[in-house]
Amino acid sequence: MKIALYNKVSIENSKRLTRAYSTSFSYAIRLLPSDIRDGIYGIYGFVRLADEIVDSFHDFDKQLLLTNFESEVYHALDNKISLNPILHSFQLTYHKYNISRDLVEAFLTSMKQDLSKSSYNKEEYLSYIYGSADVVGLMCLKIFVEGDEKEYERLKKSAMSLGSAFQKVNFLRDIRTDYKELSRAYFPGLDMNNLTTGEKDKIIEEIKIDFKAAFDGIKQLPKKVQLGVYITYVYYYKLLKKLEKVTASEIMQRRIRIPNYHKIGLIAYSWISHKILFR
């Protein structure tokens, strides 16, 4: 029975990590049914550890850390155990919901690119987004449909659109930091020293297409998960609208964000609009 206690402690670690790193995402998860929250925490914890390695641990050998992390991930998945509580929590989710190994592999491939690539052509850009974001949406979809393969296949494209929309908003919001501090330029074909508002607006129109496809999919999700997913959708769409209102030069000078007190208002707005739009 002690493994049950370790499972509980591991899930709690993923939950605490999620709440420490993302207040907005944590709010959304709390509105999901209690029986599937642990799975989402498991995925977020896994993704966050990899993100931290490539984005934050500047005083350490990132390549070594990521190589070791990848080995630990596959060991956890193959053996159904890890002494890293976050990875143990993830492998519990992975096996419970029958998440495909190729989704994990694609995600780790994109993370490795962050250590070696500084710019992307269109094909590489789309491949990176698939691995870094679309597959995360697909992992979450596995949980939302509770392993129903028919529903998973039906909603797969919209889940990928949602992942793409979120990632592209992140790219645009963080474009200055990514370029100036991490030497990364994700959007293909841009002169990062002379980004124009027209180019920025073209990116936003592309993201709106992803949001439209994602919204259509959210309406088809099981009722019990719609509100939690929709709140995250509303938060990112609001952020996109803020990015749309500022010039390209402003985006290159400061990080556009939504204050915490506005996030509370967005939750209330989401709850009301959900009642109207998802009848």
Image (cartoon, rainbow, N blue to C red):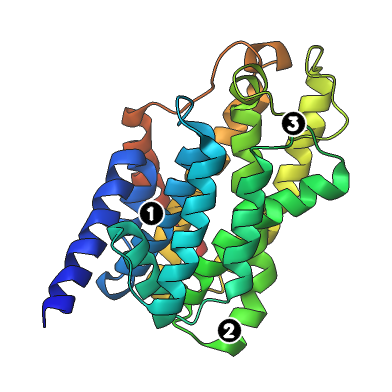
Q: Which mark is residue 45?
A: 1
Question: Which residue is at a point 59% across and 46% down the rendered structure image?
Answer: 166
Residue 204 location, x and y as percent?
Answer: 73, 36
Q: Nearer the viewer, mark 1 or mark 2?
A: 1
Question: Which residue is at a point 63% across and 19% down the rendered structure image?
Answer: 176
Residue type at the position of mark 2: Glu
Question: Mark 3: few, some, or many residues within 10 Å (few <14, many ≥20)?
Answer: some
Position of residue 186 in the picture relative to residue 35 (left or right):
right
Position of residue 30 in the picture relative to residue 134 (left or right):
left
Question: Which residue is at a point 66% across and 80% down the rendered structure image?
Answer: 154
Residue 251 falls in which quadrant of the image? top right
Question: Mark 2: few, some, or many residues within 10 Å (few <14, many ≥20)?
Answer: some
Q: Which mark is residue 118?
A: 3
Residue sitting nearer the eye, 224 or 272: 224
Residue 170 location, x and y as percent?
Answer: 59, 37
* First in sequence: mark 3 vs mark 1: 1
* First in sequence: mark 1 vs mark 2: 1
Q: Nearer the viewer, mark 3 or mark 1?
A: 3
Residue sitting nearer the eye, 53 or 65: 65
Residue indicated by mark 2: 151
